[in-house]
């Protein structure tokens, strides 16, 4: 392995990498070794045109761009010399010659690499008295993206992304020189399942999402690490929070899961957290037949009373549960313990399916199907047959995926059941047949782990608090267990303790509890390769 | 199909000369323009199909080069070189005279669609300045009257 | 004006004969004899060594040693090897390649053939600027003639050596004359120069090993092979052997082409050969090597036209395009025209070039309008310094140097412009 020296520190790097790649491999780039750059991106082809990443290399008279210089054993690199500083000043000053002074109205302000680098590496004032280039502003580039041609610094990350990642190539650079502009072909907008990634890639406010436009200034936002719940890929995200509200998702880099990307559907799925259709009350079906708002405690009592009645009259075998792939490993482990304590094995997992692609999007449209299966839940098809056949009288249902056409299809199929207890984040048609409905927390509102399609166990932590009474599914099930007087549910449900317990009980999860999986997750022991 | 079968056949002959199809793109655009005058979005789509590339990439090429046009042009292109050696010998004054003579502004087309008048950078005729390029021909060692005569003779 | 060179030498001595442009006329004057000698009597290595020994430098502006460039081509590879002939001549002030294409296309083909033999290349792409319709047609006809005679195609001159030549016309972009910009354009893309590494000998046309040479460079080759490296070194200077075809334009009595040995003094070319300044005026400045090269003032024209001497005057030979400016000339206007060109022709990739060329021209516009200040002159020099040596290709340097040259030698023109708020040279050429 070649050894290079950067600013006096000797580093062992991988053969065949460029300086920027090597530093990125080591996690040092912009994190100990500062080489500002625009056009380079770890997941795109090398461009070499912004010229900001120039560094001094001993033995080479001209400055070299770090993004395109392969490492060589013994190479000595200097990133903070006077020459390098002057070169950076030069690039920054020249970029600001035509860039419009839009900061006061630009969404990117506060997370703008032009602002950041101008501040860190630029000159204190602009000497240009010349009129700036006039170009198109507020271009409706596609369903998700709005484009300001004047702000563009022509780093070409967006054009390279569209060609190299989704392969749709909607963007090009038309004309040449200082008249160069990013354009689409007439009639072919920027419209692919990953289109909004260009807004993350764009170092400036040229490409921004329509969704986030003018919503809030980013310096009010706190970015909480999380995991997208749109499908079983489990893309890592930042949840941008202010005022106890998630304003947007941004992809968080995880080279083993989603690189630096997220699909548009996943990116927009933050809306389900604050959706109007959130379940905000507990409901109990009254004697007269209508669902009535209840306190949470009364809801649990009503649920446990019904279950107890069934167990006493027909035995626990008539009780079944439908697990949700939206629930965490800790929630599902608690369900498993509850069923064991009740004395029934009837359970199934309902997972909605949809389209998938070769990139990130998976067919299973929930984040924890693999976790559910690893915890022993088989697909709910068998259970559905039992339900139709009349072998189930009491059903504890997590979520409403049971209503998917692949399973029961419609609530009427459950109307013959004596007891239906629903735990859900959102309102649904399950309310037609439910006897008790209890609100539970979204993955953005609780701690826990989710296992993605690849067997990677990833943690979530609360980004926001619901404005109503709601608990993690596991906590609700534990309270149900306690209410039923079942053994093992005496203690208050603590997700960390449950997670450790789960990891201790199930060999595949050893070392993969909430406290151990870290920021980027860890794969189940039997996940295979 | 906007591109004629004849031009298509000639494009195929060009494609055969290169190790990759794309090598024939510039020759193809020249051939197409000779027939159609400019590259419209519809034309660009057909070109993209012929070369297995995208309409965006075709338009990148069209808008990059001076000799490809993405909008209709006059029947004749009259370009006066205004680079340094030619400017030293009065080329810019000559161009302004032609603009007045034809009643157009810089880069504009006469109202009858006959002539698009503009300037070009060095055409490799520096010792024969001032000069102009009309379609495929050079007209060198000009004075204003000669230039007007040549332009008037264009149909 | 005379279209053929006023002064000829081995390259252009037969240019007055129209038939020299035909295969028959060319062969009558000994044409293709060198190619025959190379292919049938010399090994490829011997040819490369001869060119190396001759000291021939590229005539496209960079002056890179040709033999050395040929030796960069890999000897053993299963990839096809290509040559590219840079016939994109677009450097303002240069019109020498044009005359070679028009009047000696077979000399070009012969040089290509010898280079192909020397480097083991299977195809040469002649990239000719799109505006050169007639020169391109001359080359096209010559190619057809050569194929018909068996000097191109399979089993050339009875040997087992095969070679193809493909002519492609460009479409109007100065930057397509940059080596890797040319390769991009050849591949049907925008002529945006490539990052280096990799270099063309490793990854060139269509990804294959390629050597790119200028038209005139190829044209010297048959003469060197015919008459030998020592013969060639008899022309020019020790470090810059051979002749070149200088193009003289601007305010001279006899603008035109002059084939002279490298090292001929600039003042000799301007005052003796080109007849001195026209209209009885005095010289103010001369750009010696095409518009990218810094200008020389009247007092510094006693310089031999070869890089080893021109470098001391902070300029270079470039393409030998000599532009003469008399004392009516406003150097600010000259700068206006120069910076307009570079702004227009920048491909736009590199920050410094894209924004720097635009900024510089806008400053010239403002100075010309009468709204300039002395600070602008410092900004021009500073921007030029920020553009130099830091971009993908040398275009940014070529855009910076002329501005530096003008301010180095003609600062007074600028200061007067700025102080008076208008051009102080009423007789200067019109903008």
Image: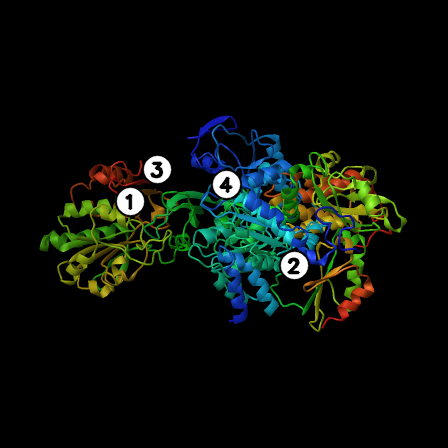
What residue is shown with label 2? C138
* Earlier sequence position, callout 1 versus callout 3: 1
Q: Which numbered mark, 1 or 3, is in the foreground of this view?
A: 1
How many other residues sit within 10 Å of disc 3, few (<14), some (14-19) or many (≥20)? few
Evaluate whether residue A421 shows in this view. yes
Q: Determine crowd level at label 4: few under 14, some 14-19, many 20+ residues with C-alpha closer than 10 A.
A: some
Q: Which of A238 and A341 is in front in this view?
A: A238
Q: Where is residue A367 in the image (x, y as percent from the top left)?
A: 31, 50
- Label 3 resides on the chain identified as A
How many angstroms separate mark 1 from mark 3 (CA)? 15 Å
Which residue lies under the disc numbered 1? Answer: A455
Query: Element at badge 1?
Result: loop
Q: How far apart are marks 4 and 3 (CA)?
A: 51 Å
- Percent of width and height locating residue C65: 62, 38
Pick the front one: A170 or A479: A170
Q: Label 1, label 4: how many angstroms apart (C-alpha)? A: 48 Å
Q: Which mark is residue A518?
A: 3
Q: Name the residue under label 4.
A: C74
Residue at mark 4: chain: C
């Amino acid at each position: 392995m070649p050894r290079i020296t950067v600013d006096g520190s000797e580093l062992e790097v991988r053969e065949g990498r460029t300086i920027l790649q090597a530093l990125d491999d080591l996690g040092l780039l912009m994190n100990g070794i500062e080489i500002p750059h625009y056009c380079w991106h770890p997941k795109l082809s090398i461009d070499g045109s912004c010229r900001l990443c120039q560094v001094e290399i001993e033995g080479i008279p001209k400055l070299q761009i770090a993004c395109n210089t392969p490492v060589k054993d013994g190479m000595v690199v200097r990133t903070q010399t006077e020459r390098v500083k002057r070169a950076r000043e030069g690039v920054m000053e020249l970029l600001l010659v035509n860039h419009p002074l839009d900061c006061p109205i630009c969404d990117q302000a506060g997370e703008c690499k032009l602002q950041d680098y101008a501040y860190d590496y630029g000159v204190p004032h602009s000497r240009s008295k010349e009129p700036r280039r006039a170009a198109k502003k507020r271009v409706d580039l596609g369903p998700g993206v709005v484009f300001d041609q004047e702000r563009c610094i022509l780093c070409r990350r967006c054009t390279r992304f569209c060609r190299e990642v989704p392969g749709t190539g909607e963007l090009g650079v038309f004309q040449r020189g200082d008249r160069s502009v990013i354009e689409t072909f007439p009639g072919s907008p920027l419209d692919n399942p990953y289109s909004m990634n260009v807004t993350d890639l764009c170092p400036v406010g040229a490409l921004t999402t329509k969704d986030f436009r003018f919503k809030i200034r980013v310096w009010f936002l706190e970015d909480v690490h999380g995991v997208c719940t749109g499908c079983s890929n489990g893309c890592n995200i930042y949840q941008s929070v202010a005022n106890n509200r998630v304003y947007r998702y941004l992809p968080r880099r995880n080279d083993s899961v989603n690189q630096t990307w997220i699909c548009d559907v996943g990116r927009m799925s933050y809306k389900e957290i604050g959706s109007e259709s959130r379940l905000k009350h507990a409901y109990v079906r009254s004697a007269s037949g209508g669902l009535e708002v209840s306190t949470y405690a009364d809801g649990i009592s009503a649920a446990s009373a019904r279950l107890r009645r069934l167990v006493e009259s027909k035995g626990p075998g008539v009780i079944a549960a439908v697990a949700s792939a939206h629930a965490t490993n800790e929630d599902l482990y608690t369900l498993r313990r509850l069923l064991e304590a009740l004395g029934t094995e009837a359970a199934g997992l309902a997972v909605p399916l949809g389209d998938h692609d070769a990139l990130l999007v998976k067919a299973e449209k929930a984040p924890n199907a693999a976790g559910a299966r690893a915890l022993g839940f088989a697909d709910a098809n068998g259970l559905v047959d039992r339900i139709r056949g009349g072998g189930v009288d009491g059903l504890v249902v997590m979520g409403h995926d049971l209503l998917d056409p692949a399973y029961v299809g419609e609530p009427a199929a459950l109307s013959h059941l004596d007891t239906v207890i629903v735990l859900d984040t959102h309102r649904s048609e399950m309310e037609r047949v439910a006897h008790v409905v209890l609100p539970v927390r979204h993955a953005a509102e609780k701690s826990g782990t989710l296992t993605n399609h690849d067997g990677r166990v990833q943690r979530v932590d609360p980004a926001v608090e619901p404005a109503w009474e709601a608990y993690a599914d596991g906590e609700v099930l534990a309270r149900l267990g306690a209410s039923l007087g079942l053994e093992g549910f005496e203690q208050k449900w603590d997700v960390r303790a449950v997670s450790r317990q789960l990891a201790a009980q199930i060999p595949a999860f050893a070392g993969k509890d909430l406290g151990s999986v870290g920021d980027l997750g860890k794969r189940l022991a039997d996940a295979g390769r | 199909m906007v591109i004629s079968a004849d031009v298509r056949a000639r494009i195929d002959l060009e494609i055969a000369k290169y190790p990759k199809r794309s090598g024939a793109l510039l020759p193809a655009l020249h051939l197409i323009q000779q027939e159609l005058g400019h590259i419209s979005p519809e034309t660009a789509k057909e070109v993209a199909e012929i070369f297995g590339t995208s309409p965006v990439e075709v338009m990148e090429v069209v808008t990059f080069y001076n000799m490809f046009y993405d909008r209709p042009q006059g029947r004749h292109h009259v370009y006066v070189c205004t680079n340094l050696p030619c400017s030293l010998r009065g080329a810019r004054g000559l161009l302004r005279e032609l603009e007045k003579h034809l009643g157009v502004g810089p880069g504009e087309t006469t109202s009858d669609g006959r002539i698009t008048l503009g300037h070009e950078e060095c055409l490799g005729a520096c010792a024969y300045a001032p000069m102009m390029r009309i379609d495929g021909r050079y007209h060198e060692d000009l004075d204003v009257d000669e230039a007007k005569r040549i332009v008037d003779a264009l149909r | 004006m005379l279209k053929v060179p006023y002064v000829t030498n081995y390259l252009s001595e037969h240019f007055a004969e129209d038939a020299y442009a035909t295969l028959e006329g060319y062969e009558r004057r000994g044409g293709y004899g060198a190619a025959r000698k190379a292919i049938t009597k010399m090994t490829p290595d011997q040819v490369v060594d001869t060119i190396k020994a001759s000291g021939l430098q590229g005539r496209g502006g960079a002056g890179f040693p040709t033999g050395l460039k040929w030796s960069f081509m890999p000897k053993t590879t299963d990839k096809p090897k290509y040559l590219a002939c840079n016939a994109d001549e677009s450097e303002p002030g240069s019109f020498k390649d044009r005359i070679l294409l028009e009047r000696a296309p077979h000399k070009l083909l012969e040089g290509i053939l010898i280079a192909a033999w020397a480097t083991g290349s299977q195809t040469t792409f002649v990239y000719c600027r799109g505006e050169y319709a007639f020169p391109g047609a001359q080359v096209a006809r010559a190619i057809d003639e050569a194929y018909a005679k068996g000097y191109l195609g399979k089993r050339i001159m009875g040997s087992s050596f095969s070679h193809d030549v493909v002519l492609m016309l460009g479409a109007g972009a100065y930057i397509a004359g940059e080596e890797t910009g040319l390769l991009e354009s050849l591949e049907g893309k925008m002529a945006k120069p490539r990052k280096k590494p990799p270099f063309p000998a490793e990854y060139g046309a269509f990804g294959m090993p390629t050597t790119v040479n200028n038209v005139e460079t190829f044209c010297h080759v048959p003469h060197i092979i015919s008459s030998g490296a020592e013969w060639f070194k008899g022309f020019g200077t020790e470090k810059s052997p051979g002749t070149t075809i200088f193009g003289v334009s601007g305010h001279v009595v006899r603008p035109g082409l002059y084939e002279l040995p490298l090292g001929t003094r600039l003042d000799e070319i301007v005052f003796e050969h080109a007849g001195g300044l026209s209209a009885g005026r005095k010289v103010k400045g001369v750009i010696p090597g095409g518009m990218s090269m810094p200008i020389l003032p009247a007092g510094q024209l006693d310089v031999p036209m070869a890089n080893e001497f021109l470098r001391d005057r902070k300029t270079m030979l470039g393409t030998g395009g000599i532009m003469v400016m008399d004392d009516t000339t406003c150097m600010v206007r000259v700068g206006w025209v120069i910076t307009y060109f570079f702004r227009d022709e920048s491909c736009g990739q590199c920050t410094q070039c894209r924004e720097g060329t635009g900024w510089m021209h806008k400053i010239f516009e403002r100075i010309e309008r009468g709204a300039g200040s002395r600070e602008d002159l410092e900004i021009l020099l500073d921007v030029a310094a920020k553009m130099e040596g830091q971009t993908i290709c040398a275009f940014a340097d070529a855009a910076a140097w002329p501005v530096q040259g003008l301010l180095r030698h003609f600062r007074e023109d600028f200061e007067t412009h700025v102080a008076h708020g208008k051009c102080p040279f009423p007789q200067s050429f019109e903008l």
